[in-house]
Image (cartoon, coloured by chain):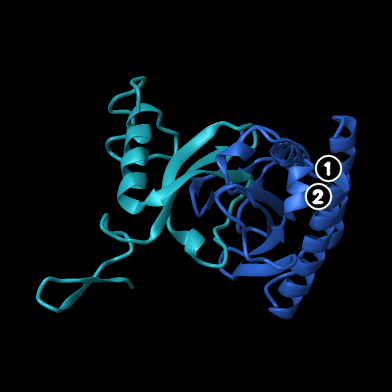
Chain colours: A cyan, B blue
């Protein structure tokens, strides 16, 4: 788990899911065999040797990488404006049809 | 039973020939095998059809063949086709297939895809037998791979 320096010489742990996590995060688009959007998501799994998620008849298309905070912001915009059927977040479709 | 997945590391692969090829293989597989009813790591798969054959996930040993395609966002550290994650509960084995950069850039070939499916089937049969986790139907899985080959060739790949 990464650690962040504090001003008085102590350190605090940063959870990987924290927005302040310094690890690189990846924005992806999950599709079915027809290329239809299933969901937008963010993962940090790429830091491992390779992700080992079961994908039954599904395709994962990485579309960008950056800080976790940036990727979460991008994902939020996409989920609000162009959600997939597997985006179950409560804000999914909140700004349907608008620009992300 | 067999299912296919794919992971593309870069937005430039969105309309690529290798992606079209793998999507065509997935569609041919689905046509031959039927839809999948159940959930994977990302959520529900297909809805239960009102008629016609379908496959219930977890009912029989399954190999989930996942192709890893390198791109502008990076590569995968997979030296060769290999058994990866195994779930006794789900009766599922993930077999990771690294797609070489040259293969991805050239658009891929039917031979590469079908050969990978046959190799994955053999790995699955050995793994399920070794772990005493049920009998993987190798003959059926290999027959499906050949049907996929015929379909891809008929589509001009």
Mark 2 and 1 residues: CB-CB less than 8 Å, in contact?
A: yes
In the image shown, does B45 or A17 lie closer to the viewer?
Answer: A17
The spot of residue B134 in percent (x, y) is 71, 70
Residue that extends furthest to the left in the rendered view of this protein: A8
The spot of residue B71 in percent (x, y) is 62, 48
The residue depicted at 41 percent of the width and 57 percent of the height is A24
The residue depicted at 84 percent of the width and 37 percent of the height is B152
| Numbered marks: total | 2
Q: Report which quarter residue A17 is drawn in.
A: bottom left
Horizontally, residue B54 falls left or right of residue A79, namely right
Q: Report which quarter residue A44 is drawn in.
A: bottom left
The quadrant of the rendering that contains the C terminus of chain B is top right
Horizontally, residue B77 falls left or right of residue A88, namely right
Compared with B20, A52 (above or below) is below
In the image shown, does B41 or A31 lie closer to the viewer?
Answer: A31
Q: Mark 1 lies on which chain?
A: B
The spot of residue B86 in percent (x, y) is 61, 69
The residue depicted at 85 percent of the width and 30 percent of the height is B155
Q: Is tag 2's residue or tag 1's residue first in the polypeptide sequence?
A: 2
Residue B12 visible in the snapshot? yes
Horizontally, residue A81 falls left or right of residue B57, namely left
The spot of residue B92 in percent (x, y) is 63, 63
Q: Which chain carries label 2?
A: B
Judging by the rendered image, the residue that carries numbered circle 2 is B113
Residue B48 visible in the snapshot? no
Say the numbered circle drawn on residue B148: 1
Q: Around disc 1, counting alpha carbons within 10 Å, would you say few (fewer than 14), some (14 to 19), or many (20 or more)? A: many
Compared with B140, A34 (above or below) is above
Q: Report which quarter residue B16 is drawn in.
A: top right
Say the numbered circle drawn on residue A30: none
The quadrant of the rendering that contains the N terminus of chain B is bottom right
């Amino acid at each position: 788990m990464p650690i962040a320096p504090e001003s008085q010489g102590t350190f605090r742990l940063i959870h990987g899911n924290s927005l302040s996590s310094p690890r690189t995060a990846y924005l992806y688009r999950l599709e079915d065999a027809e290329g239809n959007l299933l969901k937008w998501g963010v993962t940090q799994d790429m830091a491992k040797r390779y992700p080992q998620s079961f994908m039954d008849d599904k395709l994962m298309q990485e579309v960008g990488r950056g800080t976790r905070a940036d990727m979460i912001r991008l994902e939020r915009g996409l989920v609000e404006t162009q959600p997939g059927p597997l985006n179950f977040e409560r804000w999914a479709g909140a700004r349907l049809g608008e620009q992300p | 039973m067999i299912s296919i997945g794919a992971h593309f590391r870069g937005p430039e692969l969105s309309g690529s020939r290798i992606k079209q090829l793998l999507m065509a293989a997935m569609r041919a597989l689905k046509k031959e095998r039927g839809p999948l009813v159940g959930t994977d790591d990302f959520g529900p798969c297909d809805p239960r059809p009102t008629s016609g054959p379908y496959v219930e996930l977890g009912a029989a040993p399954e190999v989930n063949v996942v192709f890893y395609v390198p791109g502008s966002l990076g590569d995968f550290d997979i030296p060769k086709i290999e058994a990866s994650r195994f779930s006794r509960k789900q009766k599922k084995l993930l077999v990771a297939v690294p797609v070489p950069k040259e293969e991805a850039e050239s658009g891929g070939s039917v031979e590469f895809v079908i050969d990978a499916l046959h190799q994955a089937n053999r790995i699955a049969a050995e793994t399920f037998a070794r772990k005493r986790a049920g009998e993987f139907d190798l003959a059926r899985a290999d027959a499906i791979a050949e049907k996929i080959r015929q379909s891809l060739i008929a589509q001009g790949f």
